[in-house]
Amino acid sequence: MTSPYDIEEIFPDDAVRLPRRQSGKSPQGLTVTLMADYTLSTRAWLPSAAIVALLAEAGVSHAGARTTISRLARRGVLEGSRQGRNSSYRLTAPAAVNLAAGGRSIVAAAAADEPWDHQWTLIAFSLPQDEVAQRRELRSRLRWFGCAPLYDGLWISPHDLTDKIRAHLAELASDTMTVFRASHVELGDSTGRNPLDAWDTTAIARHYDDFIRRWRPLLPDIRAARITGVEAVRARTEVMDTYRRLPILDPRLPLRLLPPDWPRESARDLFTAVYDGLAGPAQDHVRAVASRFTTDPLTDVHAHTVADMLGGLRYALEPVADQGR
């Protein structure tokens, strides 16, 4: 499992550098976000009827929600359990581990700028044109790892590869790939491509600005506790579903290479204010909806915060009791 999310939600096509829609309304993406936001730290079970009801509040039809749940179960993101005529679902252990690591990566990506050694990682590969599935998988992995295509068969990153990423790439295309760590050599003002051109920084900045314009007006209502119930869950799910794309579009690009006042930190601060500010009322509503479909205690339905994600959500990495199922 590369990710419980589809990279195509963010990069629908190799030729498209940015999402077609910043907000994104993929039912599978919304379901994963919803399950992660309220069950990740405990892998709590939710009645399938409760998941359907919560997705209906986000505009997903009942039939579409049930199809989405089935597809996520087939993908190994959710696992189900049945008691009589009632079914429940929770995140699988691999999905929880992946989401916990991904959540930490999302919120850590906009932390203070890290020192940069002016070196680029270059990943050159050559795959036969008929190896469509392998090419797609390789490109998807490279996207998740924060790389971008400078040329068709040459992907780059300003960061060194971790041991885990190296192992993934070796497993996927070890005999068709060469990796270098090197500095950029200027050939003149009108010759060659700058490595930063692999990312459309103008478009990325525009998406940051769109995010800030969309969410900043909510802060007064959040601080005054005027957003509750359905609105709290909908806003919290949407802000996460939107914000999680930004660190993939802007994978900790060194600030010294970017325009002044790059909006990465402002967007992260705003995300934290919205996501954490709505945690309490959103958690209360999810528990209220779930309580209509089960008599089980719902104390395991818990809304984590940005600080929890930054700490790693360690409980998601440990086995969780099956609650008799």
Image (cartoon, rainbow, N blue to C red):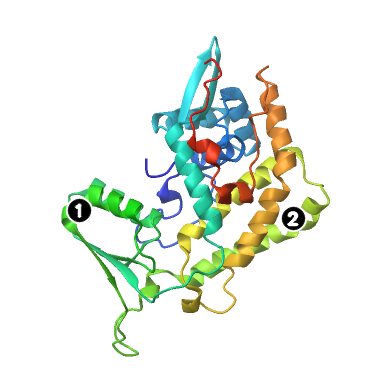
Residue tagged by mark 2? 218
Q: Residue furthest top?
A: 84
- Rendering coords of residue 28 (x, y %): 49, 39
Instruction: Please give the label number shown on residue 246.
Output: none
Residue 97 in sight here:
yes
Marks 2/1: CA–CA distance: 48 Å
- Rendering coords of residue 31 (x, y %): 54, 37
- Rendering coords of residue 121 (x, y %): 32, 67
Residue tagged by mark 1? 174
Q: Residue at x 35, y 74 (%)?
A: 119
Secondary structure at badge 2 equals helix
Q: Residue at x 45, y 54 (%)?
A: 10
Q: Residue at x 51, y 74 (%)?
A: 255
Q: Within 10 Å of the Cα at label 1, are there few (<14), some (14-19), or many (20+) other Cα atoms? A: few
Given the image, on which type of amino acid does mark 2 rest?
Answer: Leu
If the image is split into quadrants, where does the N terminus sit? Answer: top left
Residue 152 in sight here:
no
Given the image, on which type of amino acid does mark 1 rest?
Answer: Ser
